[in-house]
Amino acid sequence: MTQRLKVLVTGASGLVGAEVTARLAAAGHEVTAVVHHRRTLVRNDGTPLDPTTVRCLPADVTRPRLGLSEAGYAELAGAGLDRIVHCAAITDFGRPEEDYRTVNVDGTAHTVELARATGAGLVHVGTAYVCGERDGLIRETELDQGQRLANGYEASKLRAETLVHKARADGVRAAVVRPSIVVGDEHTGVVRDYKNIYVVLKLTTEGRTRSIPGLYEARLDLVPVGHVADVVTRVTERFDEAEGRTFHAVGAPLTLRDFSDVMAEYPSFHVPRFVPPTSFDAGRLPARERRYYERIVTLYESYFRRRMTFDATNTAALGLRGAPGNGPDFLRKLIDHCLESGYLGAPPAGTGPAAHDASGAGR
């Protein structure tokens, strides 16, 4: 085993945070999990973490000193922490700007201050989409390129990562991990929380939104939650090597054409039609569909016109294999789980593994 570390994980009850916490505890590290609203740690597959392997600390990253008393904060700061892994964040779209500021920005600032006070190495979990609406190759070494940001979430994560970079210039030891679109398990498709891309999947396959502004050559980068947790864990354990660098935790990109082709394999699904943004007119949509478009699809439509590729040179240098290389096959696994779980309804006849095998699509 590598050196036994004392690690504090913020956002430990979240999808990524719980998987990171589980990996660190399984590796024998002494883990303190910062919890807030959700006090029970549950892994992506629904398995609770053994409470004897992790110490849970009720705290609030949005408040100075993490909301702890002076004595409690002094005890934490003096506990000899080796690493602080900052996973806490709001990742939902369409939230008030105040929510993004208090959690994503202020929460990062307060965590940075704890790293400064303790001298612990900080592993900050951001997002690959701090790149905004840029096309082409997005390098791990890039941050603020004057890019246009699509929403309050992206803007808050850019501000948060900028805080980490500034703190690093002031002597705080830090590394950054940037996941892309975090989804379910690489092998089973299982996911604990149906958010973001899953919401769009449900609306489109149920025919609630039939026309969406987008480019068929646009790329969605889906990364299994396990791969993200592996990258964060490796950066935490090999921090001396990772310090000062940024690591893209990215996955299996697929184009919107791939997305549509896979949807068409499921007879019960409606396949969305992607209309060039320059030709799309929301005013021509039926009233019910227009309401879904205005309330939900507008939050995500920027992702349906982006044509970027994420560089992962630093991640590969840590010896981590890439996430699933075949986007369509991985998407099928995610969809099949959604059918089996009932999120998209009962599996209709003629779909599932047998149908995919018959069509020649690999599993």
Image (spheres, rainbow, N blue to C red):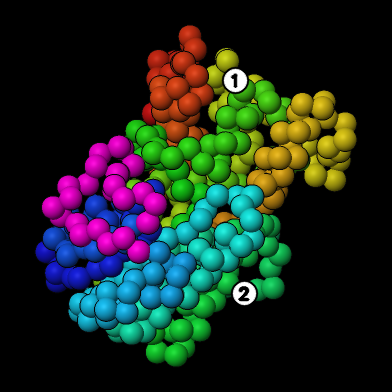
- As drawn, the label of residue 169 is none
Residue assigned mark 2: 144
Say whether residue 39 is magenta: yes
Q: Position of residue 341 (x, y in %)?
A: 41, 25
Give the residue at x 42% y 67%.
61
* Residue 214, placed above or below residue 66: above
The residue located at (52%, 53%) in the rendering is 91
Kind of residue at badge 2: Asp
| Residue 83: image location, x then y, percent | 28, 73
> Is the Cβ of the residue at disc 1 closer than 8 Å to that at disc 2?
no
Residue 269: assigned label: 1
Looking at the image, can residue 347 be seen? Answer: yes
The crowding category of the residue bearing disc 2, from other C-alpha atoms within 10 Å (few below 14, some 14 to 19, many at least 20), is few
Q: Is residue 6 magenta?
A: no
Res 36 quadrant in image: bottom left
Which stretch did the figure color magenta? Answer: 36-59
Quadrant for the N terminus, please: bottom left
As helix, strand or loop, the secondary structure at mark 2 comes to loop
- The image quadrant that residue 149 belongs to is bottom right
Give the Cα separation between the discs numbered 1 and 2.
40 Å
Check the picture and name the quadrant holding the C terminus.
Answer: top left
- Label 1: few (<14), some (14–19) or many (≥20) C-alpha neighbours in 10 Å: some
- Is residue 6 placed above or below 361 in the rendered structure? below
**Residue 347 appears at what percent x and percent y?**
46, 16
Residue at x 47% of width, y 67% of height: 62
Left or right: where 133 falls relative to 339? right
Q: Nearer the viewer, residue 320 or 244?
A: 244
